[in-house]
Image: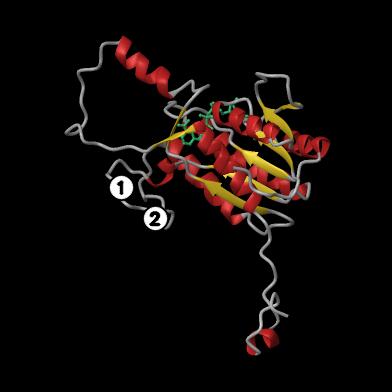
């Protein structure tokens, strides 16, 4: 299903990654102008800008050269590394550098891939939604850095020309995954399948990567300045702008 949208020019940051690649494919499929910014290049089918998001000047150069109006920022080191400094450098300082470059270059939209983990502290979460704040004691450095990055993105809404939003996927599966299936397979190969956490009734959310990618396109399409409120006089007369 396609949704009508104004033609933006997209830069997918982290576009060489698992989710980023699916976002690039979907943008290409609907005929949009899309480039990739990443520290590694995996394909040559779209314009590629090599750079690190913690360097504002590198991001700004890519934004200017590509003429970007909408950034989709999916970059992050993989979860479960024992490297808090790297998470802080890329996810917190890097995301702030992306925001600063976006404001500097007059970019209109920034969609950030956060994570459901930003509200997880190890205890069960049932029927919660985005009103739940991050826990006082974060689960780990990865989730803490994702929460700080998300906070910076939301605070940047309205800065300069910029409108922002953040999505919180849970586990992502599908073609191109290099983390989830590889991890499960390693557990199997290492003969660790006899371990059980909990009573075997634990639930966890998984979403197909194509659906997570599509959610990013929809978020970008909907990220528009709300129309101005109708003049007070028309409200008093009980007539809307559309009726007149
Ligand atoms: P991935 O590792 O496949 O892709 C991340 C991309 O970011 C890679 O191409 C990597 O080279 C790039 N990158 C890393 N550091 C960079 C830097 N300093 N500058 C520029 N590019 C850099 O990861 P993924 O699974 O596609 O995850 C994408 C996003 O979704 C991440 O932000 C992650 O936190 C979030 N997320 C993933 C899952 C999941 O299950 N995979 C779940 C929830 C949230």
Q: Earlier in the sequence, mark 2 or mark 1?
A: 1
Q: Quarter of the image containing the N terminus?
A: top right
Q: Which mark is residue 132?
A: 2
- Residue of label 1: 125
Q: Is residue 234 left or right of residue 184?
A: right
Q: Who's the residue at 70% across and 49% down the image? A: 5
Q: Position of residue 159 (x, y in %)?
A: 69, 57
**Circle 2/circle 1 CB separation < 8 Å:** yes
Q: Quarter of the image containing the C terminus?
A: bottom right
Q: Which mark is residue 107?
A: none
Q: Secondary structure at mark 1?
A: loop
Q: Position of residue 160 (x, y in %)?
A: 73, 57
Q: Position of residue 101 (x, y in %)?
A: 73, 44
Q: Position of residue 41 (x, y in %)?
A: 67, 20
Check disc 2: other Cα within 10 Å, few if <14, some if 14-19, many if 20+: few
Q: State the CA–CA distance, disc 2 to disc 1.
A: 10 Å
């Amino acid at each position: 299903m396609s949704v009508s949208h104004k033609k933006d020019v997209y830069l997918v940051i982290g576009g060489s990654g698992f989710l980023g690649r699916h976002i690039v494919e979907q943008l290409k499929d609907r005929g949009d102008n899309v480039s990739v910014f990443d520290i590694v290049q995996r394909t040559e089918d779209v314009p590629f800008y090599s750079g690190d998001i913690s360097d504002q000047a590198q991001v700004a150069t890519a934004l200017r050269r590509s003429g970007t109006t909408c950034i989709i920022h999916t970059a992050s080191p993989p979860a479960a590394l024992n490297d808090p400094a790297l998470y802080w450098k890329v996810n917190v300082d890097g995301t702030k550098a992306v925001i600063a470059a976006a404001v500097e270059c007059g970019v209109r939209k920034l969609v950030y891939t956060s994570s459901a983990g930003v509200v997880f502290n190890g205890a069960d979460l049932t029927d919660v939604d985005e009103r739940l704040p991050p826990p006082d004691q974060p689960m780990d450095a990865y989730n803490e850095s994702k929460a700080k990055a998300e906070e910076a993105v939301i605070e940047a809404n309205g800065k300069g020309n910029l409108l922002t939003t953040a999505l919180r996927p849970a586990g992502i599966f599908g073609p191109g995954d290099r983390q989830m299936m590889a991890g499960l397979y390693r557990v199997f190969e290492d003969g660790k399948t006899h371990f059980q956490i909990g009573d075997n009734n634990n639930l966890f959310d998984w979403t197909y990567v194509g659906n997570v990618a599509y959610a990013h396109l929809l978020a970008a399409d909907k990220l528009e300045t709300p129309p101005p409120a109708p003049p007070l006089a028309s409200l008093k007369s009980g007539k809307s702008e559309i009726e007149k």
